[in-house]
Amino acid sequence: MSKDQKETRILVTYQSQTGNTRKVAEAIYEVLPEPKEIRPLKEAQSLEEYSLIFLGFPVHGSGPNPKATSYLENNTKDKQIALFITHAAPEDAPEMPESVQKFCDAAGEADILDVFHCQGQLSSIVKTVMRFAPDPQVREWAKMDNSKGQPDASRLEKAASFAKRVMEKQNTPVLSNGE
Ligand SMILES: Cc1cc2nc3c(=O)[nH]c(=O)nc-3n(C[C@H](O)[C@H](O)[C@H](O)COP(=O)(O)O)c2cc1C
């Protein structure tokens, strides 16, 4: 690296209640070049020292939960970020673009390099609660759920490819995994 090239310091940070978004975060982290760090969102108080941040969240109620919204609104201004999102609905569900857009809107003052989203298994506790929800639509969603086992290996591979694409946009080399 030449003297005038600034080193890209990368952070992967995520919110994850049941581990799906954390798995995606780890798949992303694995292919990123040093210097890099990975930590849960609650341990990433400030993004100031990082030049590129991968931020991951689960969809809660068709978008970011209040903590995610406030974090994105208050911490990402003028930062280069890449978003990754997990949700129980299939990737091609008609409501997904709108749900994903809500995360982008919350990070409206950031430079969003790319967004990745994939299915993540709905926890059995949440599914049970949904089965007894007053809203028939929610009960229907619980019945239709096909997210078991997600994110699977192919989705984690796609997450790694997403990270590589983001790094290419950054013009920073990625670690080779022999592909
Ligand atoms: C309170 C709550 C609300 C949720 N709302 C949605 C939703 O609106 N749409 C959806 O596709 N998945 C929804 N999910 C499922 C999660 O987004 C999905 O299981 C995600 O992968 C969980 O990520 P995590 O394991 O990192 O917490 C919801 C889950 C919870 C707990």
Image: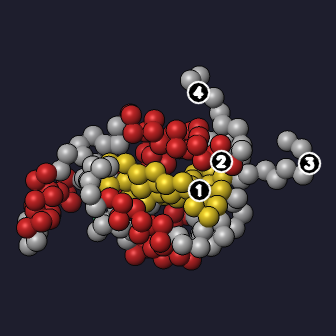
Query: Which residue, given by chain and number where applicable, does mark 4 sit on?
Result: 177
Mark with earlier residue (2, 1): 1
- Name the residue type under label 4: Asn
* SS type, badge 1: strand
Query: Which residue, given by chain and number where applicable, does mark 2 sit on?
Result: 169
Badge 4 density bin: few <14, some 14–19, many ≥20, Cα 10 Å: few
Query: Which residue, given by chain and number where applicable, does mark 3 sit on?
Result: 3
Figure colour scheme: secondary structure
Residue 170 located left or right of residue 90: right
Q: Nearer the viewer, mark 3 or mark 1?
A: 1
How many angstroms separate mark 2 from mark 1 (CA)? Answer: 8 Å
Q: Nearer the viewer, mark 1 or mark 4?
A: 1
Q: Position of residue 100 (x, y in %)?
A: 40, 62
Q: Position of residue 97 (x, y in %)?
A: 36, 60
Residue at 26 percent of width and 57 percent of height = 94
- Name the residue type under label 2: Lys
* SS type, badge 3: loop
